[in-house]
């Protein structure tokens, strides 16, 4: 998995626009330029994940956010 992580992080550094285009369908109102800036900002503030594995503390944090937003009603067990 570490090889995949290294490749994806390196690819992101040199292909920001391609990555932005690949996620465009999830953000139909955003321009590729806005998506590229957003991705770049996430990378710069170290909030873009560098590893695709979601560890338990991050998983629990995500559940808290989803519960507070009313998107889920109960916590699910971590199965990492």
Image (cartoon, helix red, strand yellow):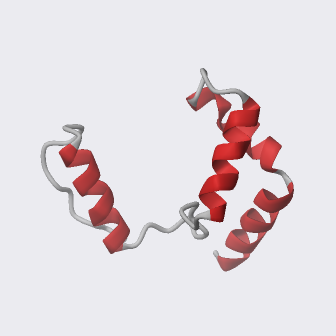
In the rendering, at what x and y percent does residue 32 appear?
74, 32
* Quarter of the rendering containing residue 2: bottom right
Q: Which residue lies furthest to the left in this view?
A: 74
In the rendering, at what x and y percent does residue 44 appear?
65, 63
Quadrant where the C terminus sits is bottom left
In the rendering, at what x and y percent does residue 17 appear?
81, 42
Image vertical order of residue 40 relative to residue 52, above or below: above
Quadrant where the N terminus sits is bottom right
Image vertical order of residue 38 relative to residue 9, above or below: above
Which sits in the foreground, 43 or 73?
Answer: 43
* Quarter of the rendering containing residue 59: bottom left
Residue under the point 79% across and 49% down = 16
Residue under the point 68% across and 71% down = 5
Q: Residue furthest top?
A: 29
Horizontal side, residue 56 vs residue 42: left or right: left
Residue under the point 81% across and 43% down = 18
Residue under the point 37% across and 67% down = 58
Q: Which residue lies furthest to the bottom in this view?
A: 2
Horizontal side, residue 52 vs residue 54: left or right: right
Which sits in the foreground, 80 or 45?
Answer: 45
* Quarter of the rendering containing residue 42: bottom right
């Amino acid at each position: 998995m570490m090889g995949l992580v290294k490749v994806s992080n390196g690819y992101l550094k040199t292909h920001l626009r391609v990555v932005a285009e690949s996620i465009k369908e999830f953000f139909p109102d955003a321009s590729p330029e806005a998506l590229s800036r957003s991705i770049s900002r996430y990378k710069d503030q170290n909030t873009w994940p560098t590893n695709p594995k979601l560890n338990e503390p991050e998983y629990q944090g995500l559940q808290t956010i989803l519960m507070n937003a009313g998107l889920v009603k109960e916590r699910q067990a971590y199965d990492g």
